[in-house]
Image (spheres, coloured by chain):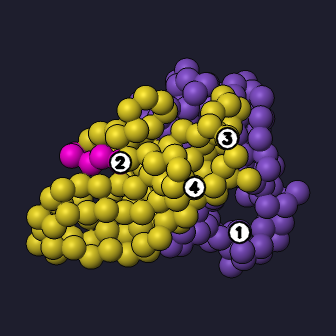
Amino acid sequence: AQSVSQHNHHVILSEAASLELGCNYSYGGTVNLFWYVQYPGQHLQLLLKYFSGDPLVKGIKGFEAEFIKSKFSFNLRKPSVQWSDTAEYFCAVMGYSSASKIIFGSGTRLSIRP
Amino acid sequence: GAGVSQSPRYKVAKRGQDVALRCDPISGHVSLFWYQQALGQGPEFLTYFQNEAQLDKSGLPSDRFFAERPEGSVSTLKIQRTQQEDSAVYLCASSGGQRNEKLFFGSGTQLSVL
């Protein structure tokens, strides 16, 4: 069965600090991977995705993530965070079949000190 | 607006009452997902439709939960004989393609069972 594990429940950083949020998945096959973000008071929205090709994917607002197949990981990174990055971040996995469901992790709350 | 619309926004039910939650996806979107999100948790998969076909209902917690999408557009999630543990935010998401490269989420329905 598919599952996603996010190691950090709450991360607190100062502005300009570097960010890395961990995500590991379990799935017995080819996967597609996502990071979704929920800013305070807003809907969940897509930050970035990996479907195929270059395992280093870039998303909106300077975020990037690297798919490491041997480690079953898809960690999210940003070199320098801003106060506006305060949000909840969710990693998600989907099997390659078009009939596959999308499974989300439990989320990481990111708080940025101005 | 052109986004995913869910109604009602808030629902308070007495234990044992039946409730129906509505989702209007973005027009023309093929895929529709329902998720349950408890406080402080990630979205938990409930069920998935492609057009009117319910491809996966493995996440429905019990036979009290039922979802339909009869004409391949609007979907309704029905919960019979609600219990306190059903209290959560119910999220609907839609996607334009079968590959589900990007989910568009609604604001959710916050269900409180007293």
How many residues crowd mark 2 within 10 Å: few (<14), some (14–19), many (20+)?
Answer: many
Inspect the image, locate mark 2, and give the three-letter code of the amino acid beneath it: Ala
Q: Residue at x 38, y 47 (%)?
A: A66
Q: Which residue is mark 3?
A: A29
Q: Which residues are magenta?
A: A61-65
Q: Secondary structure at mark 2?
A: strand
Q: Position of residue B79 (x, y in %)?
A: 77, 57
Inspect the image, locate mark 1, and give the three-letter code of the amino acid beneath it: Asp
Q: Which residue is mark 2?
A: A65
Q: Position of residue A102 (x, y in %)?
A: 61, 45
Q: Is residue B112 left or right of residue B14?
A: left
Q: Is residue B32 magenta?
A: no
User: Which-is-in-front pick, marks 2 and 1?
Assistant: 2
Q: Which residue is mark 1?
A: B86
Disc 3 to disc 4, how far (Cα)?
Answer: 11 Å
Determine which quarter of the picture holds residue A77. Answer: bottom left
Inspect the image, locate mark 3, and give the three-letter code of the amino acid beneath it: Gly
Inspect the image, locate mark 4, and give the three-letter code of the amino acid beneath it: Tyr
Chain A rendering hue: yellow
Q: Secondary structure at mark 3?
A: loop
